[in-house]
Image: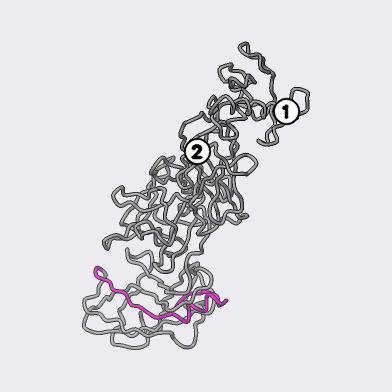
Amino acid sequence: MLSRLQTFYRFTTPNLPSGVNITSANVSLPYYYLVTNDCYMSVGIYQITSNWSEHGVIWNNKPTTAPTCSDIVDVYADGVNEDNPEYAVFSVTNYVKSWYIGTPNYGFALKREGGENYSVIFVAKEKMQIFAQLTINYTGTHFAEGVYAVRKANTNTYVKAYRPISLAWVLQDSTSYTSPPTSISHLENLFKISYRPATNDYVIRSMLESSLVIFPSVGNNAPIAGRLAENDAELSTDYTWKLVYTSGYYYITYTENGVTYYVRSTSANNDTILVLTTNRYASGTKWSFYKYLGNTYENIVTEDFPLSLSLDETYQYHAYMQSTRINHNGPVSYSVVDTDGSSTTRATINASTGELTTLFPGKIQVRVTYPGAPWIWCWNVSIGGTFVDEVPTNLRSTPTHLCIPCAITNIAAFWCINHGMLQFDCIDEVTQNLRAIEVQAAMINGSGQGDGHCANANIQFGFDIFVHEDNGTT
């Protein structure tokens, strides 16, 4: 760099998150000396104030620069040659800050300010395997919480999850999307990301179900999807990530025992699993995020949810919640009531596990909800087979279910069951007769057209009159 020569550098303006506070910025520029005797040259860095082109600039059309330099650095020879270059690091904080408040970014100019050597060479980007670097440090922001589609940088490939039995791989989708899959119809491609300021890390959950956490597994060398009961604040850092923003892209990272791992897509093959790598420069480690901007979404999805049950059996119900709201991740809770919403004795269910046990025939309602949910989701369930007018068909038509000596059709027996009285289990004949009279009265007080209404049981049913051969009681 002779006294009248200048060197020009320009960097693409990085995309920074909104609301950041730039604390410092510097450029590291590689150089070497043609003559390496013990001497130095002082170099100043100036902000360029007019446009220029890389292949068109000459001395007569060189761009204008600011009148004062931002920083001066002494670059020493001391064995620095083409095979052993060094970096000169310049502070450019104010220049870089100005880019983000409207000043055009035309780059930097280097000028000789003094010294004893004129043979320093600042390296062009095409010349060597070391490159000029711009570093911007900032505070006051983090990745915005929300629901996102995650894209492999500069491709049409997105991450997807699926609902596992226990654990699952995390995949890159086989579909090549022309626009980000950020609608509710693409829940397998959507991930809910929350920030934890106490540990400065992120929890990533699949929108397929809010209990499904995407977490790092160094043993499997891959990110894994698995159900975890803890809420975001309770999760160990073994299950969380760092999101590192660099030059317009994000790295999804995890550090264990001092080693940092990066989520990587290894190829463009269909449904290839994502892996972990310690090489941040490997292809497939850069990611872009596209935010879901739709309405708040709340839903319950079910698996193993039978609607017709047998008596004296135990069933396992499974329900999972979906919510776009941050920190609303359950757990789901289960309950059973009669179909009119009143309490029931026909079945019990474990509120946490969904294990249901049937006790008496009839219709019940299985309900599922979660903390902060806007609704309770309900399913009508039959115990004891199919029903006509709330009466199980097997009790309407099977002679062995007649209640003797009531000698009334099996509907009377069903009425007894509805009242918590065991069929065929009247204490004595007097009790049987009294119950027979009560049942008949409830039926006779019905419409008189073959259908009766039992006011005590508050159910509508059909019945037949039956004359028993032994005693003729009606």
Work out whether 46 lies above or below 197: below
Query: Which quadrant does the N terminus fall into?
Result: bottom left
Name the N-terminal-most of marks 1 and 2.
2
Can the viewer see residue 5? no
Q: Quadrant of residue 272?
A: top left
State the image coordinates of residue 325 (x, y, percent, origin top left).
55, 57
Spatial CA distance of label 1 from label 2 is: 39 Å
Q: Name which residue type carries label 1.
A: Gly
Residue 205: give its label. none
Residue hosting label 1: 452
Residue 108 drawn in magenta = yes
Residue hosting label 2: 303
Q: Name which residue type carries label 2.
A: Glu
Residue range corresponding to the magenta coloring: 83-109
Give the residue drawn at x 46%, y 70%. Answer: 11
Extreme-top residue of the structure = 469
